[in-house]
Image: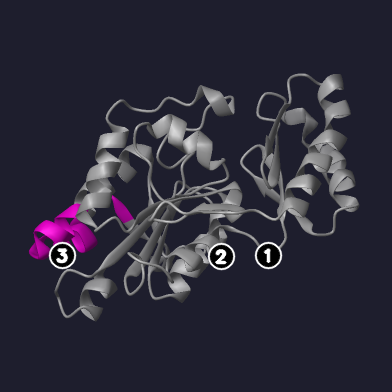
Amino acid sequence: MSELIAQSGGAAPMLAIFTDFDGTLVEIAETPDAVDVPADLADQLERTARDFNHAFAVITGREIADIDRFLSPLHLPVAGAHGAQRRRADGTLLELDANISGAAQAIADALRPLLEEHPELILEPKDGAVALHFRQAPELEEDCLLAMQAAIGTHPEFTLVPGKMVLEARPAGIDKGSALKAYMQEEPFAGRTPIFIGDDTTDEDAFRAAQDLGGIGIKLGPGKTIARMRIADVASVYALLEGLTQIVAQPHATANLADESPILADTTAH
C-alpha cells in the first residue's frame, strides 16, 4: 500500500474497492448454498461502500441474484458469472447475449449424465456460465475435467477455467479482469485507484487488471499469484476493509495500515 500513499503525496488516495465473494467475504462451504454469511456483513459492506463514495463492487463467479440473496437487503454493484453478468452502480443491469445463455444451458445439459452417475457432484448452471463442483468427490476431478472438455468442445465461444474444487465454463474473453476494467470506466469508480481482493485462480485476471491500472491485487491465503500483496484469511479481509475506511477518515492512518500492520504481506519481498 505504501506506493499508493507515495503516489498521492502522503494524502489519502482515492480508492475503488473490489472483492470476490466465496473464500474472500465468506468462508468456502461444502456446497454453494451452505455458506455462512455473518449477520453483520451486509452492514459492514454498506459502510465500506458509503465511505468510498459507493466505489465498491463484488466480482464473483456466482450469479448476481445469489449475492443479492446472501447480502439482502443490500444491493451492491455486482459482476456475476465472472463478468458475464454485470450490474452498474446506478442499478443498470447489462443484458447478456441470448446465444451465450443458450450455449451455457447446452453445456449444463451435456453434463447431466455425469451427475446422474455421481450424485455427489454439484452442477451449478448460471445465466452465461456453468460450474461443476467436485468438493465432495475429489477423486472424480479427472472425470469432471474430461466431461467438461467434451461439453465445451462444441461451443468454442466458451473456455474452461479451473478453480478451488470446481471447473467452470465461461465465455471466452469474459473474466473478472474485464469486469473490473469495465467498472473503472464508469462512475463512481472512474479516476480512482483499484484494489482487488480475492482467493482463487479465477481472481488472477482481476489482480492483473487492478495492477495494470496502477492499483494492487491482494491474494487471500497461500498459492502462487501475480498479486503484489497477500492476506491471511477471511477475518483479515474484514479487518482490512475496516482499515481502508481509516484512509478516508484519517489520512495519517495509512502509514500504519501499509507498513506496520500484520494484516498484509508483500508477495514481492521473497
Within-10-Å neighbours for mark 1: few <14, some 14–19, many 20+: few
Q: Are marks 2 and 1 in contact (CB under 8 Å)?
A: yes
The kind of secondary structure element at disc 1 is loop
Task: Give above or below for 142 relative to 89.
Answer: above
Residue found at x 32% / y 37%: 235
The magenta region covers 245-264
Task: Give above or below for 205 relative to 169.
Answer: below
Amino acid tagged 3: Ala
User: To which residue does mark 2 refer?
Assistant: 178
- Which part of the image, by quadrant, shows the N terminus? bottom left
- Which part of the image, by quadrant, shows the C terminus? bottom left
Magenta: predominant secondary structure element?
helix
Label whose residue precedes the other's in the sequence (2 or 1)? 1
The kind of secondary structure element at disc 3 is helix
Q: Specify how the rendered protein is coloured.
A: one colour
Residue found at x 21% / y 73%: 5
User: To which residue does mark 3 refer?
Assistant: 255
Label whose residue precedes the other's in the sequence (1 or 3)? 1
Label whose residue precedes the other's in the sequence (3 or 2)? 2
Q: Are marks 1 and 3 in contact (CB under 8 Å)?
A: no
Spatial CA distance of label 2 from label 1 is 8 Å
Using the image, tell me which numbered label, if any, was put on residue 173: 1
